[in-house]
Image (cartoon, rainbow, N blue to C red):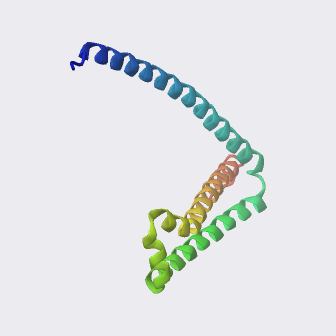
Amino acid sequence: MQFDFTIGIGEMITFGAGAIYIGRKLLEFAGNHFRSFMRRTRLEELQHVRANRHNATLINHTSISANIYLALFILACGMYLALILGSPTFQQAVNISMWVAMLLASPVFIFEALWLTRQKKAEALIAAHGKLLRYNGFRR
């Protein structure tokens, strides 16, 4: 039995070209939507900062909530480390699979994400408030 390589190669080239074309169109479509989503999100953040840069109470609240999430993140890291070092049942659960370990470590990841987002918002508000004070004639 002989195999005809010319038909196989032609089909592979056609399939490959079609897959590349479809892949590029999907990436272009997803890229455009992702880009517009990121621009819209950035615009909403800037509007929030501009609307609230005069509100010193909100600036303090955002800064304090970022510090609270930092404390919770450090506490979650310490608890996770203590459980890994001190509890044999926790070590066995972590050794079962990577997914179980990630599930048990999820509070650490959640508090880290919350801390970083609040910290970013607090820094943006503080910077905008500082610019506002500088433009109004106050010097530090």
Res 60 → quadrant: bottom right
Give how far across and how far down residue 69 sits, in percent.
Answer: 63, 68
* Image position of 100 with respect to 20: above or below: below
User: Where residue 127 appears, x then y in whole percent?
Assistant: 63, 52
Q: Is residue 107 above or below residue 23?
A: below
Q: Pick out the residue farthest to the left.
A: 2
Picture quarter with the N terminus: top left
59 horizontally vs 105: left or right: right
Q: Which quarter of the figure has residue 111?
A: bottom right
Identity of the residue drawn at 64% across and 35% down: 37
Q: Is residue 89 left or right of residue 133?
A: left
Q: Residue at x 49, y 79 (%)?
A: 90
Which residue is at the far front? 1
Above or below residue 10? Residue 118 is: below
Residue 38 percent location from the top left of the image: 61, 37
Residue sitting at 68 percent across and 46 percent down? 135
Using the image as rendered, state which of residue 122 and residue 79 is in the foreground: 79
Rendered residue at 64%/40% (across/down): 42
